Structures are given as structure tokens and as C-alpha cells.
Image: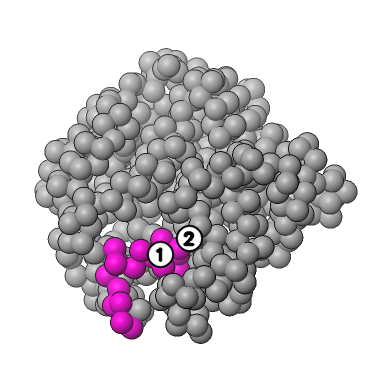
Amino acid sequence: MSIKRSSGILLPISSLPSNYGIGTFGKAAYDFVDFLLKANQTYWQILPLNPTGYGDSPYQAFCTYAGNPYFIDLDILCDEKLLDKKDLNKLKVKNLSKVDYAYLYKTRFNILYKAYLNGIKKYKKSFNSFIQENINWIEDYALFMSLKKHFDMKSWLDWPDIGIKSRHPEAMDKYKELLKDDINFYSFIQFLFFRQYEKLKKYANSKGIKIIGDLPIYVALDSSDVWANIEEFKIDTDTIVPKEVAGVPPDYFSKDGQLWGNPLYNWDYMALNGYKWWIERIDGARKLYDVIRIDHFRGLHEYWSVPYGDKTARNGKWNKGPGIHFVTVLKEWFYDTQFIAEDLGIIDENVTKLLMDSGFPGMRVLQFGMSPDGTSYHMPHNHIENCVCYTSTHDNYPMMGWFKHAKKKDLNYAIKYYGLNELEGYNYGFIRAGMSSVASLFIAQIQDYLGLDEKATINNPGTLGNWKWRLTPRQLDDKLAKKIAYITKINNRSRVK
């Protein structure tokens, strides 16, 4: 499937405005869909919707299928009589520009438990149907989260009961009975999450807005995915310790590389069962998204393997991935699904060939071509139609942040090459360059349209304390929407149906 010439905006759900500490599926989300419509956009790109674990990263989730309970809108729960308005007054936060994950962790589950008590009987029939429709993951996830709570939120690798750690049938039966109420609670809040998200997505689609979602190539070690499917990963089944973990070698972002710590896949085992685990995973993702962006696509050709216990990714090595055989299986199963390949990082001719053979559009990031020492691959004159052009990604400074910290030679080069000027705004110079590219799809972070600097960065790879930036109320208005709509129209990227 090909993408028609169009454009969109990248904005995580967590970054939407709200009074309760984080963006949700509430009014601000619907308002943003309306903003995209006014701005002549076709796509809304978001980050993974999964429940965040270590470092609050959506790329280290407790489950690849489950939704983040923080995104459940509390005002909607009030409208449904599952909560009372007075319950919410004390939950309002003063700082609307940052996500306070510690505060959310302390308060959000208590209020959701009230909604659970008020809603479990009211929605009994539809809740039971939801369980049956998601039986392939919901029971393992709800039990996993209940066990984490029971064991003081320790990683499942550190649970003191070897029986449940290894999923012995007797232990499974024991804890399912012991933790029955918690299991129902964690299942019910997933019901609430999907109920709200499906309504939001239906609204967006009805307005001609399609949602691009991110599929992290790896899952977290501390997840129900690994605990329930240990044979799919490179983990010693006797000691229950990973043999190797994921990361990337030293690169643009880090001199020591990035040590992600995710368990690596047992690709040989996966191939024998027809990649069943992956097929079920992507089937779940396509129910959430209209387009799926496969994170770290180069890991399907070769992946960086780091010995478990190392403190950096420096001592890793490249191992062979499943390659075109895996990609072909996905394309056969999901022939009607649009994919985008995140082909960033260290790219060689073999990765390029895999991308070409897949037919998936890759990514071109203008910020990576803004230097005489940069990668010409990302410069607009080297773009191809079957690609997605970005000004910057969630792992980069917004454009104005780059300008503040750029080396003088890079700044002069960017100004000259892209014909930038202060009067127009350097950020809009790059937006103009991306919009006019031959790339079928152009995506900009909302921060780039707003002219925000490095303080509005979503994630600095290899560091903690990220994923906090938020829009504040009234930052988006009709004037900005009209400006975006105009530049979209003159570059022939008006909305496609």
C-alpha cells in the first residue's frame, strides 16, 4: 500500500493539555483532531500507548497489548457516573507544562479503583465481551500486574516465589484465586482504556484523520509479554536470566551507544512457529492504528547484542536478524496494512536493500542533513517519493533547539543550503523544505510549528527524566491552524480521504 501525498503532526497523547497531570483521551484530544482538520492535515502521529515501566518510557512497557491507564480521561468517567466531580478537584495539578509521573503513580490508580467499583456491575456484559475478545493477552497481563503489586512492584525476575516466577500450574491457580479482585481491577481499567480510545479513533477517522502508531521493535524485560512467552526470547529457562540484551552501538546520540536492556528474540524458535507471537502482536496494533511505524527496522537485518550485565553498549556485537523472510510473512498476513520503517541509526547497503525489498517507506529526517558532515541521504534533493520526511523526531531537539546549540559551521551551512531567514523563522524554513519534498508524507512535531526550543524535547536518548513535555491550554489556535493549512495547500499536501 502506498501513501498519497499528504502531511501530519507528531504529538504524543501524554503531551495533550489536561488538568490532571497528563494528556488523556478527553476533550483536548478531540480538540486536537479538530485542529488537524482546520490545519489541512491527514495524519496524527502518536507514540506507543502502552503502560509505561522503567524510566516512564513508552518503549519499556509492561505489556505490548495493554493501554496506559493514565490516558483514561477522568472527566469522561464523571460523565458516565463512575466518578463524582468532587473526587477530581484534589487531583488537579498546578504545573500544566510537565507530566509528573511520581504524582500520577501515587494518585491515579486510587481514583481508577473507585471507577472500577462503580462500573464493574454497570458494564458487566460489555466487560465480559471485552475479556473474551482479548483473551490472548488480558489474563496474563492482569495477573502479571496483580503479582507486581503483591510483590512490591519488583521485576518478575526478582519475585521470591519460584513457582509463579516460572508459571507452574499450581502457583498460577493459587495466585489467580488470591489476587482475584486485583485481576478484575487491572482488566477493567483496560476495558475503560479501549472504550475511550476506540471512540476517539472513530471520531478522528470520521473527520478524515488517520492515526500513525509506533510499534517498538523490542518489548521490556519486565513485562507480561516476556513472563508469559519466555521461550520466544534469548533467556536461560533454568536460571531465568537473559543471555544478551538489546541496544545500539556508539552513534550520533551517544559515545557509549545506547544500552536498552530489552531481551533479544529467539528468532530461530519464532521462525519454526511461523512468527505467531509477532503476528498476534501486530494484529493487536492494527486495531489501534491506521498506519504502523516499525521502530528500529534495521534490527530486522542485524541487531546489536550486548552481554547481560554490561554497563554500556560498547562491547556488543552484530547478530543476524530474520531479514526478508520475516518481512515477507508480515506482508502476507497484513497485506492491507500500511507500515513505515524507522530506518535510522547505522545503515549499510544490506539494510537499504531490505528496506527496498520490503516496499515500506523509510524515514528522512531533515535535522540529520543540516551539516556539511551530515548524511546527504536526509537532504530534500535526495528524497524519494516512497519515504516519510520529518523535520525532527521525538528523539531530537525541536528545530529551534537545534539552532540554539548548533556549531557555527553547521548553522551557516543550514541557513545557506535551505535558504533560511530570521524573518520567516528558521523553523518554518525547514517546514517549507519538508513540505516541498517529493516524499509522499511529511511529518513535523507540533513543537516545530510553535517554534519551541530544546526545553520542549520529548526524549533525550540514553538519559532518564524524559517523556514529560506537554502543550499548555491555548497554545494552539485558529491562526496557527490557518498558517499550517496554507503551507500545506501550496505544497499540494491537502487532506486525502
Residue toward you, 216 or 64:
64
Is 355 a magenta residue? no
- Residue 305 spot, x, y in % from top left: 24, 69
Instruction: Determine crowd level at label 2: few under 14, some 14-19, many 20+ residues with C-alpha closer than 10 A.
Output: some
- Residue 291 spot, x, y in % from top left: 38, 34
Secondary structure under the numbered disc 2 in the rendered image? helix
Residue toward you, 151 or 451:
151
**Circles 2 and 1: CB atoms closer than 8 Å:** yes
Is 233 a magenta residue? yes
Q: Is residue 339 left or right of residue 164?
A: left
Residue bearing the label numbered 1: 228
> What segment carries the magenta color?
222-239
Secondary structure under the numbered disc 1 in the rendered image? helix
| Quadrant where the image shows the N terminus | top left
Splitting the image into 4 quarters, where does residue 23 fall?
Answer: top right
Splitting the image into 4 quarters, where does residue 472 fall?
Answer: top right
Determine the residue positioned at 84% across, 55% down: 90
Determine the residue positioned at 34% across, 21% down: 5
Residue bearing the label numbered 2: 140
- Residue 338 spot, x, y in % from top left: 32, 32
Splitting the image into 4 quarters, where does residue 150 fall?
Answer: bottom right
Q: Amino acid at mark 2?
A: Asp
Give how far apart the Cα atoms at labels 2 and 1 are. Answer: 7 Å
Q: Amino acid at mark 1?
A: Ala
